[in-house]
Image (spheres, helix red, strand yellow):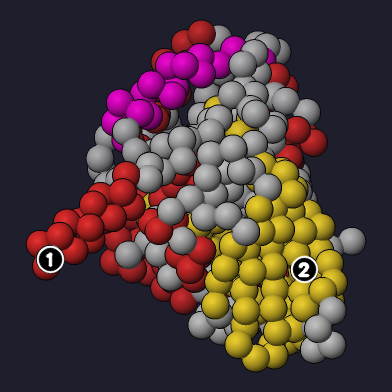
Amino acid sequence: MRKYSLLIVASALVACARVAAPEPYGAIPSPQQVEWQKMEMNMFAHFGPNTFTGMEWGLGTEAEDIFNPTDLDCGQWASIAKAAGFKGIIITGKHHDGFCLWPNPVSTHTVARSPWKNGKGDVLKELSDACAAEGLKFGVYISPWDRNDPHYGTPEYNDVYVETLKSVHDGTYGEIFEQWFDGANGEGPNGKKQVYDWPRFHETVLSLQPKAIMFSDVGPGCRWVGNESGVAGRTNWSSLNTKGFTPGAGSPPTDTLNQGNVHGDTWHPAETDVSIRPGWFWRESENSKVKSLEKLLSIYYTSVGRNSLLLLNVPPDNRGRIHPADSARLIEFKAALDEIFSENLALGAKVTASNVRGRAFKPSNILDGNHDTYWATEDGVNEAYVTFDLKGVKTFNRVMVQEYIPLGQRVSSFTIEAEGVDGVWEEIARETTIGYKRIVPTEKITASKVRVNITGSYAPPVINGFGLYLDNISGYNEE
Ligand code: FUL
């Protein structure tokens, strides 16, 4: 008898184990892209001759001795970035003026010719070391457009640029998590625009840093969000049609970059780059124009809260330090995020769903804090809902939902419903895409049950995170 029941238990276990995970759908991320997306917030650092001249786009004719920070401290940048919750820092190793913050062997326009540290300094080395010490990742912006290099506008420049990339990615600065290629492309001394050899540039980076994510209008790796104001599309697909497009003038229209393409051919999640100040570079006159806490929170909701990574520019000043106006605001920002998101009011809820694929995909997986466990429905069931019984009444105004992106982005429409104290269900939000993370602002709602109702999905939904939060700090609301 005992043997018999053991057999039943064993075969039941086998049956459970047999329920396969849903098939991936459409374009899917690489493991590196998943890790990148989980970073959520990174710091951008625009620094170079413009920091000393007050220009946004240096001419390339600036004398090297203009670069002379009096008190450069990359440790200060890294510790502020860490305290503010950023996971990595991306620095403008070379902006359009061509000046290199490291002794680039194929350029004469570098720190080696500056008075800073008697020409022996290397900002990339100092910053990559400081990042490593703080456990932050290190990334670089190496502008393809170069207003200094005499070869610019000729095929030889592509060789110079490849050598430039090599000298940054060859391991001198450790692992580089992201290479930023911006799309600006002006004319060289011969009046011609450079014809970039993008495949060669990509190969160069990947051969040296196989894990690096490459940013441009069309990746490969991640895409520009289409504006510099911190706003990703309310509908935001991480997939994009890239065939036939190039970074810069040949890129898809900005509204496409902003929203991605449903069924796009490759996984190119949006990165939202925006500056904490009016300009990308530090200038004295903008010390009083650092974005308000309210604005930063709004940017957080329209970037991280809309399935995008936030790359917030915090430009160091002409001493080579982050100005107190910026660091104070960043710390306020982090404190506000902690206050809003430290308590997930949905934790402890009883979770049920209208359809469940099998035990391994049970609805309570959504609240277990594990990225890799999720609720999924059976094949063929693309519309379904999941209900959170809050075991009491909770008041919230932010609803967070996450899709398990390793299987692709699937949901195209959903609503959020809440059961109020009067026992009446009410629709409180109606949205389109979810992706890695969607934070939906709502009115202040007091409810005992909340439901996510997936009304459109291209494959069985796979949901791995849910949260209810109360934001008493920002008045942010969508439209
Ligand atoms: C753009 C540049 O032209 C701006 O100066 C800035 O660096 C921004 C982040 O990218 O393409």
Residue lying at 70% horizontally and 19% vertically, measured from the top left: 250
Q: Amino acid at mark 1?
A: Met
User: How far from the left and from the top, in percent, is residue 390?
Assistant: 62, 83
320 versus 420 height, above or below? above
The outermost residue toward the right is 479
Placement of the N terminus among the 4 image quadrants = bottom left
The correct choice, above or below, for 197 with respect to 426 in the image is: above
Q: How many marks?
A: 2
Residue, disc 2: 417
Image position of 316 (left or right of 162): right
Q: Nearer the viewer, mark 1 or mark 2?
A: 1
Residue farthest to the front, as pictured? 1
Please state the extent of the stretch shown in magenta in the rendering: 193-209
**Does mark 2's beta carbon lie closer than 8 Å to ligand 1?**
no
Residue neighbourhood size for the residue with mark 1, other residues' Cα within 10 Å, grouped as few (<14), some (14–19), many (≥20) = few
Q: In this picture, is 180 found above or below 366?
A: above
Question: Would you say residue 207 sits in the magenta stretch?
Answer: yes
Q: Residue at point 51% right, 8% down?
A: 155
* Majority secondary structure in the magenta region: helix
Residue position for label 1? 1
